[in-house]
Image (cartoon, rainbow, N blue to C red):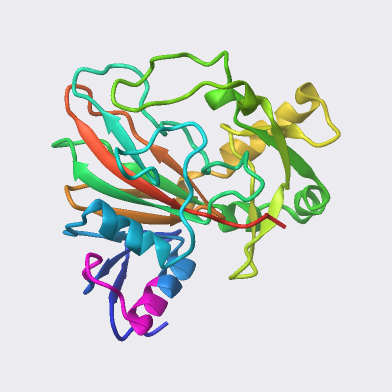
Amino acid sequence: MHYEHIEVRPIAGALGAEISGVDLAKPLDNRTFAEIHQALLDNLVIFFRDQTLTPDQHKAFGRRFGGLDIHDYVGGVDGHPEIIPVIKEAEERGKNFGGIWHSDVTYQEKPALGSVLYAHETPPYGGDTLFANQYLAYETLSDGMKAMLGGLQAVHSAVKAYGPERERGRYKSIQVAAREEAKQEMVHPVVRTHPESGRKGLFVNGVFTLRFAGWTEAESQPLLQFLYQHSVRPEFTCRFPWRDKSVAFWDNRCTQHFALNDYHGHRRAMHRVTVSGDRPF
C-alpha cells in the first residue's frame, strides 16, 4: 500500500513495522487514522518511537479502534481503570508479566482486538518483546493438518493464570487477583478467520488453552504442544527493542507475543490499554 500521511518501515520479514510521521498525542484526522489502521492490518504489529502520552491521550488513541477493556484480574492505574501497569522493579528476580508466548484474554467470549503498550521506563538493555505471525503459523501447515484443525474447537480458561491456586504475590507493582471465576471456560475455533482481513490463523496459546472441545486434556496435549511450538517458529517472528516513549500496538486476533525477562537489576515500567474485540469465528 502507498501511504501519504505516515511512513511505514518493516522491521522483519514475517510481521512488524515502525511508523513515523505522526504524533499520537494529537487527535488523528480520519485519513491518518485510516492509514495507521491499514498498517496494523498489513503488518500485524506496529511500533512508534518518541511519543509523549498522558493517560488520557493513551486511551484516546486506543478508542479510535474501539471500546477499551477493563482487565478481569489485573488492577488498573489510579483514576484510569482501562490502563494496566506492566511493571517489574529492579529488585524483582522472579517471573515477569507476559513472559510466555500467548494471545491476550482468549478466555473471554470476545477476546481483545489488540493492545497498545506504552513504555515509561525501560532498562538499558534487554526487555524486548517478541511477536509471532499466526497467519503464517496456519498457512505453513500441511493440507491434512489444516483439514483436521478446521473442524476443531478449543477450550480456553484463565484458571492457569488467575485461578485461586495460582501463586500469590508474584509481582510487586502489579495488582493481580486470583479468583474462583477464573475457572470458567470458553470455547473458540482452533483456526480463526480474521474479521477484517479474511485470512485464517491459528488461535491456540499455551497460557489460556486447556484442551480441544470434546477431547480430554491428555488426548489434547500432544497436538497442542506441537501447535504451540510450531506457531512461534523463529521465521514467523519479529523482535522489538524498547526505548522510553516507544509504543507497540499488536493485533491480538492474529499474533502471539512474549516479553523477555533478561534485565534483572533494572526497572521496566509500561502502561497498556486493550481494545475490545469480537467473538472469534
Find out whether residue 47 is within the magenta segment: no
**Which image quarter: residue 86?**
top left
| Image height of 190 relative to 33, above or below | above
Q: Nearer the viewer, residue 125 or 249?
A: 249
Q: Nearer the viewer, residue 71 or 2?
A: 71
Residue 23 position in % (x across, y down): 21, 69
Residue 154 position in % (x across, y down): 74, 40
x 44%, y 74%: residue: 38
- The answer to whether one can see residue 84 in this image is yes
Q: Residue furthest left?
A: 124
| Image height of 90 relative to 203, above or below | above
x 52%, y 39%: residue: 102
Answer left or right for 93 relative to 46: left
Residue 61 position in % (x across, y down): 34, 63
Answer left or right for 251 relative to 152: left
The C terminus - image quarter = bottom right
Residue 142 position in % (x across, y down): 73, 53
x 62%, y 21%: residue: 180
x 57%, y 16%: residue: 164
Q: Nearer the viewer, residue 65 or 49?
A: 65
Q: Nearer the viewer, residue 147 or 111?
A: 111
Q: Residue furthest right?
A: 214
Residue range corresponding to the magenta coloring: 23-36
